Image (cartoon, rainbow, N blue to C red):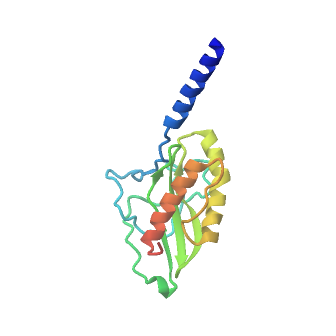
């Protein structure tokens, strides 16, 4: 009889603990670009296609070795989306808990023709680098297929997926697509 009372009380306490448990939503914040003293503006700037790699801000595991030059001004593109001109914009650097990434998008008219990583830093975390090497190419393909930032995340890379989606959405917004 004593065991029954203890088991019932422990079960009730455990159930109350489970019901009281609340998870917090995934938090993804934009981080300032390396080398800039002030936080990024709310509207990301469009940029020309990067001309070369910046090894100081790149992880060796980065799938795309291009990085924008934060010292040069990147004025927003003035071409009309309907004109068919090729335009490129980079989203803000987004802190995704295991590093910082920025997505670059190239469009022609209203069609996304290329999605890549403008900058990526995993702070030397080898596991994060491995996850990014596997997930980022899938995320790029999903964005091309969806022609928007409304993409599924990659299983096992939820933080990377959320950071990628956030930066992609801002880059598309800069280009006037979303």
Q: On the rendered image, what quadrant is the N terminus found in?
A: top right
**Is residue 174 in sight in this rendering?**
yes
| Residue closest to the far left | 38
Q: How many marks?
A: 0
Residue placed most toward the observer, 8 or 36: 8
Q: Residue 32: image x %, image y %? A: 39, 52
**Is residue 67 in sight in this rendering?**
no
> As displayed, is residue 107 above or below residue 133?
below
Residue placed most toward the observer, 10 or 41: 10
Which residue lies at the image location 63% right of the left edge and 12% below the top edge? 2
Q: Residue 121: image x %, image y %? A: 52, 48
Which residue lies at the image location 63% right of the left edge and 20% below the top edge? 7
Corner quadrant of residue 12: top right
| Residue closest to the far front | 1
Residue placed most toward the observer, 146 or 78: 146
Corner quadrant of residue 151: bottom right
Residue placed most toward the observer, 75 or 173: 173
| Residue closest to the far bottom | 83
Is residue 39 found left or right of 152 in the rendered image?
left
Q: Residue 122: image x %, image y %? A: 55, 44
Which residue lies at the image location 32% right of the left edge and 50% below the top edge? 37
Q: Residue 156: image x %, image y %? A: 65, 47
Corner quadrant of residue 63: bottom right
Is residue 107 found left or right of 73 in the rendered image?
right
> As displayed, is residue 154 above or below residue 83?
above
Which residue lies at the image location 64% right of the left edge and 54% below the top edge? 154
> As displayed, is residue 168 above or below residue 26?
below
């Amino acid at each position: 009889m004593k065991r029954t009372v203890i088991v019932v009380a422990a079960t009730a306490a455990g159930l109350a603990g489970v019901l009281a448990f609340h998870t917090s939503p995934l938090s993804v914040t934009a981080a300032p670009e390396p080398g800039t003293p002030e936080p990024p503006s709310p509207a990301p700037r469009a940029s020309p296609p990067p001309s070369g790699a910046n090894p100081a801000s790149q992880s060796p595991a980065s799938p795309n070795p291009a990085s924008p030059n934060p010292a040069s001004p990147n004025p927003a593109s003035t071409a009309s989306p309907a004109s068919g001109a090729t335009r490129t914009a980079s989203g803000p650097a987004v802190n995704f808990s295991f590093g910082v990434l920025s997505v670059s998008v190239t469009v022609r008219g209203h069609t996304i023709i290329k999605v890549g990583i403008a900058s990526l830093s995993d702070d030397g975390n080898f596991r994060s680098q491995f996850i990014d090497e596997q997930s980022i190419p899938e995320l790029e393909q999903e964005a091309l297929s969806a022609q928007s930032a409304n993409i599924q995340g990659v299983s096992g890379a939820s933080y990377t997926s959320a950071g990628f989606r956030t930066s992609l959405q801002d880059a598309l917004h800069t280009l006037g697509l979303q």
